[in-house]
Image (cartoon, helix red, strand yellow):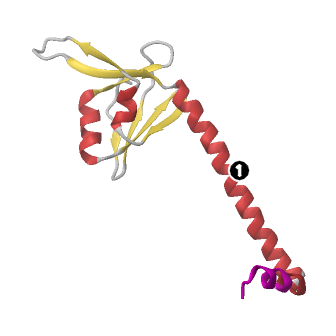
Amino acid sequence: MTKYPDPIITATAIIFDLHEPIYGSVFAIYEKWLKIAKEKKLTMVVKTPFGVSTYLTTQDWIRGAKLIKKYHNFEEPMKMYSRSVLPDIKKRTERKKIEKKIEMSSNSVMEGLARLKKNEPQMFAEIRAKLGLR
């Protein structure tokens, strides 16, 4: 397993599966992958041992990142953008919890209305009349 494997590119997203941080929770992505994501307007999904974070554009990743240049036996250095992913993972998990609660509450309301319609047709008809529904 390499430290920076090639990402998976789909029609709508580019998925990075990063295993080893540079230090702490700091991971880096090569500039060439960011250019591909920007050209194709792909959402970035970064999977790490700490969790998953998503970025709608490459600018979201670059905005908080630090440029790292790696010098090898090439004339041009390899450029990477590194950033800590932990704050973004925490934001995503909080957002997912809220979305799940909203989804569960909307499902329970619809289920409750279905039960009400089945068990209390007269009461349901009154509610619909008050709301102006047919």
Residue 115 screen position, x and y as percent = 83, 75
The residue tagged 1 is: 101
- Residue 130 lies in the magenta-colored region: yes
- Specify whether 43 is left or right of 35: right
* Up-down relation of residue 34 to residue 11 (above or below): above
- Density class for disc 1 (Cα within 10 Å; few <14, some 14-19, many ≥20) is few
Residue at the (72%, 63%) spot, across then down:
107
- Residue 108 lies in the magenta-colored region: no
- Specify whether 119 is left or right of 58: right
Q: Quadrant of residue 59?
A: top left
Residue at the (72%, 84%) spot, across then down:
133
The mark total stands at 1
Residue 71 screen position, x and y as percent = 20, 11
Viewer-nearest residue: 66 or 10: 66
Q: Classify mark 1: helix, strand or loop.
A: helix
* Up-down relation of residue 41 to residue 89 (above or below): below
Q: Main secondary structure of the magenta part?
A: helix
Residue 86 screen position, x and y as percent = 54, 25
Viewer-nearest residue: 50 or 92: 92
Residue at the (42%, 21%) spot, across then down:
83
Residue at the (77%, 69%) spot, across then down:
111
Viewer-nearest residue: 131 or 11: 131
The quadrant of the rendering that contains the N terminus is top left
The kind of residue on which mark 1 rests is Lys
Residue 91 screen position, x and y as percent = 57, 34
Q: Which residues are magenta?
A: 125-134
The quadrant of the rendering that contains the C terminus is bottom right
Quick one: which residue is furthest to the left in this view?
75
